[in-house]
Image: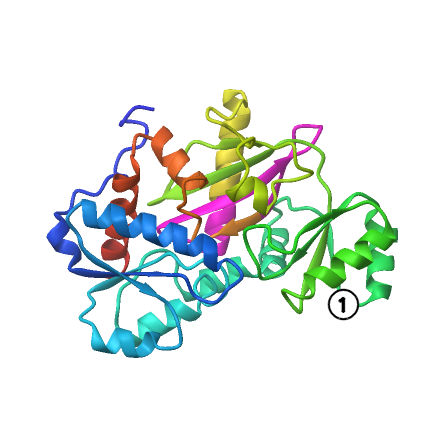
Amino acid sequence: MSDQLFSGLKSELPVSAFGRVAVLFGGKSAEREVSLKSGNAVLSALQAAGVDAFGIDVGDDLLQSLLNEKIDRAFIVLHGRGGEDGSMQGLLECAGIPYTGSGILASALAMDKLRTKQVWQSLGLPTPRHAVLASVEDCRAAADDLGFPLIVKPAHEGSSIGMAKVNSAEELIAAWQDASKYDSQVLVEQWIHGPEYTVATLRGQVLPPIGLGTPHSFYDYDAKYLADDTQYRIPSGLDAAKEQELKALTERACDAVGVQGWARADVMQDANGAFWLLEVNTVPGMTDHSLVPMAAKAAGLDFQQLVLAILADSIEARG
């Protein structure tokens, strides 16, 4: 991709402008292991670029660490609850520490798959039909209403944790019970037959979409972080008109949630070519299997330039 197509992504700031940067990673969510990998990758890239950065594995002593250390800004690489849901953003705002990524409201909204879908539906944006599961009766009612196959997912988890594809009422009940171990609120959605795409945004621009392929029944945790047979298509394989349609839909979806700095949206395409929004991630993965670095590379940014761009946005957004 040419620099003209993706102008303004790279940071033009000297590294001294960032001051002392705390990279927040780890935490206590179900995505801790992924966050540790992401955080260490980000920390290494910042330090290699000459940024005065250090890491904090977020635990119960975080507030004391923030008070003890001289911190000019924070790079949030906490995936899931406690880092991606608005709570860390709120803490940092109370402490007067600028941070990367989306603010409190957008973070909390994007972390809640049900509320995100409701916002999209209110704006006429396409998202699969769904139901909320709280009992065996809810499972049977959803099976009758939505048909099979279906996808079950905890409403407030990421990285496909607790998700399962089901083909019968019995499987649906079992998957709901399993997902309930991760979250008190569980969603079930219609299964969209067709390819999956992921689309990243960075500093107000939509990066090249990535087409995903996996021999698994869906793009699950193993396919995301462990498997070597997951396929990543850049270019996406869509024709120019459909790719532009996908990018425009992603932009509207992210604007509706209010994302800032960087994000990644997951989208399905059905057999008729229509796109369906699944969710938005406001602190996407930054591991060696992660998608935002792949999209950034296609836009002309290496990993170090990507993390500097995300960090630079925290200055533009929050001083």
> Image quarter for residue 303?
top left
Q: Say which residue appears at 25% left-offset and 40% top-offset.
A: 305
Stretch in magenta: 252-278
Q: Which of 7 and 199 lies nearest the eye of the viewer? A: 199
Residue 262 is one of the magenta-drawn residues: yes
Residue 284 in sight in this render: yes
Residue 132 in sight in this render: no
Q: Which of 251 and 170 lies nearest the eye of the viewer? A: 170
Q: Left of 96 or right of it: where is 239?
A: right
**SS at mark 1?**
loop
Place of residue 18 in the rendered image (x, y in percent of width and height, measured from the top left): 17, 56
Q: Left of 114 or right of it: where is 143?
A: right
**183 vs 232: above or below:** below
Disc 1 crowd, CA 10 A, few/some/many (<14, 14-19, 20+): some
Tell me the kind of residue under disc 1. Answer: Ala
Place of residue 241 in the rendered image (x, y in percent of width and height, measured from the top left): 52, 23
Residue 283 is one of the magenta-drawn residues: no
| Quadrant of image for the N terminus | top left
> Image quarter for residue 157?
bottom right
Q: Left of 232 or right of it: where is 23?
A: left
Place of residue 149 in the rendered image (x, y in percent of width and height, measured from the top left): 79, 43
Place of residue 258 in the rendered image (x, y in percent of width and height, measured from the top left): 44, 55
- Label 1 sits on residue: 134
Q: In the rendered picture of this protein, how many numbered marks are placed on residues?
A: 1
Q: Say which residue appears at 82% left-offset and 52% top-offset.
A: 171
| Quadrant of image for the C terminus | bottom left
Q: Say which residue appears at 21% left-offset and 57% top-offset.
A: 53
**194 vs 113: above or below:** above
> Image quarter for residue 148?
top right
